[in-house]
Amino acid sequence: MKKNLWTIFAATISASLLAQDATNMAPPLQAPPPPPEPMVNMPPPVEAVTNAPGARPAKKKTVKKAAAKKPFVELKTVPLVPGAAVVAANHVNVRSKAGLVGEIITRMTNGQPVTVVEEIHLTRSGPEEPSAWAKILLPPETHVWLKASYLDANKTVTAKKLNLRAGPGEAYGVVGTLQKGDVVQEIETKGEWVQIQGPTNAYAFMAAQYLKQEEAPTLATTEPPTTLPDGQGVAPAPTEPPAMPEPPALGSTNEPAPVVEEPPPPRIVLHEGVVRSAVSIQSPTRYELINADNHKLINYLFAPTPNLDLSRYKGLHIIVTGEEGLDERWKNTPVITIQKIQVID
């Protein structure tokens, strides 16, 4: 009996110790839930392709219509000829030499008459320097200089040939000559130089673009009248062109009519700037229009007719009107086909 009690007591203690160990054990680890699957945009259902023939849309035939040739505004840029001319701008410089290197002798204004001796062209003018210059007779009341040592007490030239200069010094340009025996009228003396009234054969230079001459009248040509065979009078000129035959009909009636593609309208622009020679040898034209303030390129200038000599405008401040487009070789290079040029004073 006593032995059984100890056995029961030992079993009870063992059971309590096992229960305590079970309560002190850590809970089992649970696996984390799987991440949600990403959402995939399913492509739209593709229609089944069958071999059955279907109706295809008819292709439209495009016929490019040639752009109508625009009338060209004739520019008055014919070369100057010897004779009378008129100044066409205000405050135009009259120089001792052809080019901007010549000293300014005097200035002339719009409407003043001059006499052109000849027109000359500079072969090596600066980028912004006019190439065409007019040699003119020295304007009246313009003074020139000569060396006093070649005059006697009666103000008579003693040298065989004496140069007249634009200023009191040999560095100034020559604007004429005097011959031995010519008498001069002294105005002022400065050192060994004498200022005199310019003789009639003295000359100077002016940018040709600032001069204009009257155009020669054009003779109208008329055709002889046509006499009727029976001599009843003169046949009147036809007022309407003869009717042209209609073009043949296009194909079958099921063929769509051709669609005529109209050309885009021309881009007419107006730009202001200074004309200069093109810097790059690969330029589309020989002359370009630059901004007068920052000297950046605005357009390359294209003359559509040989009568327009752009060298006459080099170095001048102008307003140009024309059709603007892009060069075929470089699509970012703007070129303007000139229709009108206006020189700004």
Image (cartoon, rainbow, N blue to C red):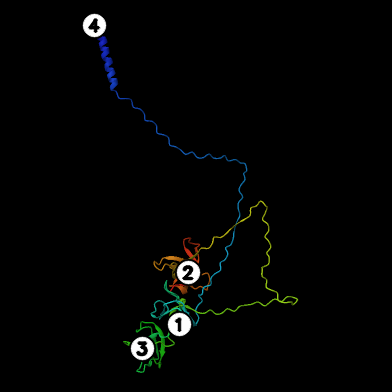
Residue on which the image places disc 3: 187
311 vs 229, nearest the viewer: 229
Element type at marker 1?
strand
Give whichever of discs 4 and 3 has the lower sequence position: 4
Distance from label 4 to label 2 (Cα)? 135 Å
Identified by mark 3, the residue type is: Ile
Residue 10 can be seen in this image? yes
Q: Height in image: 47 above or below 111?
A: above
**How far apart are the alpha carbons under marks 4 and 3?**
166 Å
Q: Nearer the viewer, residue 190 or 287?
A: 190
Of the two numbered discs 3 and 1 on the same chain, state the one appearing first in sequence.
1
Q: Which residue is mark 4?
A: 2
Seen in the picture, residue 127 relative to 65 is either above or below; the reply is below
In the image, farthest residue toward the top: 1
Q: Position of residue 232 (x, y in %)?
A: 74, 77
Looking at the picture, which amino acid does disc 4 mark?
A: Lys
Q: Residue 199 lies in what quarter of the image? A: bottom left
CA distance separating discs 1 and 2: 28 Å
